[in-house]
Amino acid sequence: MRGYLLRERDVLRGCPVGRLAMDPEIVADETLRAPVEATVGWLRERLAGVVREGVQRGEFGPELDPEAVAAALMAIVQGGYVLARAAGSPAAFDTAVRGVLALLGPGREPAAPAGVR
């Protein structure tokens, strides 16, 4: 999960999949929307799997709902892109990532920012 949240990305460009999901022509066409939906579904399931593994290993408390946490992580990353683009700075993205890592438990805050400058 840390790897996903902290991977190097050019946050000011935004997310390519997120941009597709915001395109009215793509979301209105089932054929065009299908690969976007599949990609989002794959990522959500992968993140949920990582959370499940963390719960099983005792890295997270048993109260965490893996699917809900995965959806929240994706929403935070997508929202981080929006915040960074609106501010013209990756700092807003980095703040969102630090915040979610802090919510997941002590010692999960990153030492270095995730955004590319």
Image: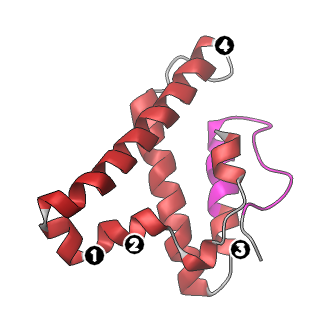
- The residue lying toward the viewer, choosing from 12 and 63, is 12
Is residue 61 visible to us here? no
Mark 2 or 4 closer to N-term? 2
Q: Nearer the viewer, mark 2 or mark 4?
A: 2
- The residue lying toward the viewer, choosing from 4 and 51, is 4
Q: Is residue 8 left or right of residue 67?
A: right
Q: Residues within 10 Å of mark 3 (few under 14, many from 20)?
A: some
- Quadrant assignment, res 115: bottom right
Most extreme residue toward the right, as rendered?
Answer: 111
In the rendered image, the quadrant that contains the N terminus is top right
Colour scheme of this structure image? secondary structure
- Using the image, tell me which numbered label, if any, was put on residue 57: 4
Q: The residue under label 4 is which amino acid type?
A: Arg
Q: What distance separates the C-alpha of mark 2 from that of mark 3?
A: 20 Å
Residue 80, percent from left and from top: 55, 66
The reply to whether callout 3 and callout 4 are in contact (CB within 8 Å) is: no
Residue span colored magenta = 96-114
- Using the image, tell me which numbered label, if any, was put on residue 91: 3
